[in-house]
Amino acid sequence: MNQIGAATMWCALSWVMVNGVEACTNVLITKGASRDGSTMISYSADSHVLYGELYHWPAATRDDGTMLDVHEWDTGKHLGQIRQVRKTFNVVGNINEHQLAIAETTFGGRAELESQPGAVMDYGSLMYLALQRAANARQAIRVMAELVEEYGYYSTGESFSIADPHEVWIMEMIGKGKLEKGAVWVALRVPDGYVTAHANQARIRTFSLADGHVSLTSRELDRIGEPAVEAVYAHDVIRFARAQNWFTGEDRDFSFSDTYAPMDFGAARFCEARVWSIFRQLHDDMDQYLGHALGRDLSRRLPLWIQPKRQVSVSDMFAFMRDAYEGTPLEMSQDIGAGPFAKPYRWRPLTWTVDDQKYCHERAVATQQTGFVFVSQSRSWLPDPIGGILWFGVDDAKSTVFIPMYGCITRPPRAYAMGNGDMMTWSDDAAFWIFNQVSNLVYTRYGEMIGEVRAVQQELEAKFLESTPAIDQAAAELHRASPERAVEFLTEYSVEQGDETARRWRRLYQQLFMKYMDGNVKTPDPPHRNPKVVWPGYSEAWYRRIIAEKGEHFRVPQP
């Protein structure tokens, strides 16, 4: 199978699709908002059928006239052929050798626009083709826009995060369905010093209309590289909406989100709430949007971006991707649904009905069905082969480890490599299965086990973060003499960290299984052969719930 279609993932969520919820979260950080001056984006690729692995497309040069087969990223379905470009760049996961990083979340949008007959470009192919063909964010926007214009757009509505060492952009796109070929879209540069996020709901509302200076239409894409440009959009994004009677106001009042992905309860509670939970950690004025996060006030929309009260570190980004509404009214570890061990997860389906009344679980950033998760760093003060890092993990962000994968590496670690197992094929040395062994064991006794997972997680991530300046320096010295040697050095370093992390996590699984097997807690008791054993039971609060429901049945008579 062509590598464009090698991954299978469906990242779509809307209120009418929540029973099959598989959704993603992105956080976008500009240079001025980051602690070290890097740009960063994060991505949790969430799907019950996505196998977590680290994709790799090596740089290549091809003959003119070469054609490329395009397969839908979600399903592997062959969509058609497009013209291949002569030269493509090295891509590792979702970052390339020029420090360009791209991520996405699916917002679905209007049902009338879900299907476009004959279209060849799906959202996954757009991301990975742009990474192979573009050297910066503005070029990526142009590549994506021109591809859907020429070949049609196969997917539903998408929000894209696009970052290079200097800029961060948010781009939102939806197809024209059976009505016309192609897509309508808007791309905005996030102001330096600000942060934004999106989580399966379109977030761009009004935007600056074309003025030939800071805002352009798709008919002027040849000027997208001009530094003053901060907004670009499909020339017919408003015209197309008018033709369907979805918008009748003045052009200046046109809102992409309100027109193509109208807000409803599910969009607020299951999608915007995740953005709110991140924003509240960076801004003191977010409590006013709690009603919106709960789905009770659809009119009070979150701002597209905020200026944070503190600069954001790589460690902060790891923490954002592990967020589960802690300390908010949506926290999942305190009610009966958390079970006796305070588990901040709810098994699907997301909505359920009792006595003809529909209810819902929460949908947090951190979720059990994550295939892979990353935080990208693009650093303008370093040469491209050294400056781009993809901090990459597989499975649930709360119980994974973010390992440094430099964007120049020529091969992935064996544990994370494409083809080492799949969703229905076990591999003993595949990181995806090793991390899932740990997380699914932890889910059974979450409150007791998660602390031990965090201790090893923090130990490894702290080691990687502390080592990065020295690795950068060593690579920079090699790069001055031989860029090829620098790439080789960073490849060996990244591969070693990935494979060793998988081995360490396998040992952690073995230790946890032995210690917590059969509901006991066992600790070594040298020089005795047998360990000490304690029976922790349940919390008093949980015992009281048992008593309230069936206490008389279990009551032991007093002598």
Image (spheres, rainbow, N blue to C red):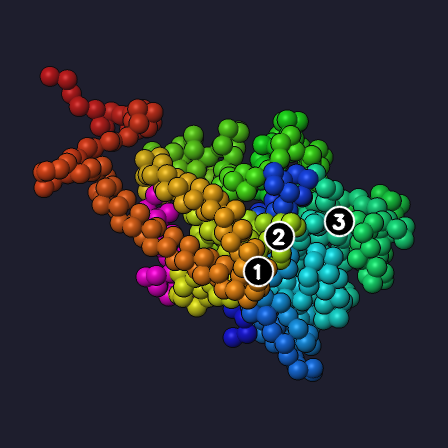
Task: Say what amino acid the circle numbered 2 marks.
Answer: Leu
Query: Mark 2, residues whose alpha carbon is within 10 Å: few (<14), some, or many (≥20)?
Result: some
Amino acid type of the residue tagged 3 in the rendering? Leu
Q: Tell me which residue sits at (31%, 27%) in the image.
A: 539
The extreme front residue here reads: 481
Residue 385 lies in what quarter of the image?
Answer: bottom right
In the rendered image, which residue does mark 1 sit on?
479
Residue picked out by circle 3: 188
Indicate yes or no whether the magenta region holds residue 437.
yes
The crowd level at tag 1 (other Cα within 10 Å; few <14, some 14-19, many 20+) is some
The mark tally for this picture is 3
Structural distance between the alpha carbons of marks 1 and 2 = 10 Å
Magenta span includes 257:
no
Magenta-drawn segment: 422-442
Task: Give the residue drawn at x 90%, y 53%.
Answer: 212
Task: Give the mark nearer the N terminus: 1 vs 2.
Answer: 2
**Cα gap from disc 1 to disc 3, whole angstroms:** 34 Å
- The residue tagged with tag 1: helix, strand or loop? helix
Q: Which mark is residue 382?
A: 2
In the rendered view, does 62 fall on the left or right side of 204? Answer: left
Dot 3, how many residues are within 10 Å of its Cα: few (below 14), some (14-19), or many (20+)? some
Q: Earlier in the sequence, mark 3 or mark 2?
A: 3
Check if mark 1's residue and mark 2's residue have beta carbons within 8 Å.
Answer: no
Q: Nearer the viewer, mark 1 or mark 3?
A: 1
Label 3 sits on a secondary structure element that is strand
Left or right side of 550 for 213: right
Whether residue 34 appears in this view of the structure is: yes
Q: Which amino acid, mark 1?
A: His
Q: Quadrant of residue 493?
A: bottom left
Of residues 487 and 168, the one drawn nearer to the viewer in this rendering: 487
The answer to whether one can see residue 356 in this image is: no
Mark 3 or mark 2: which is in front?
A: 2
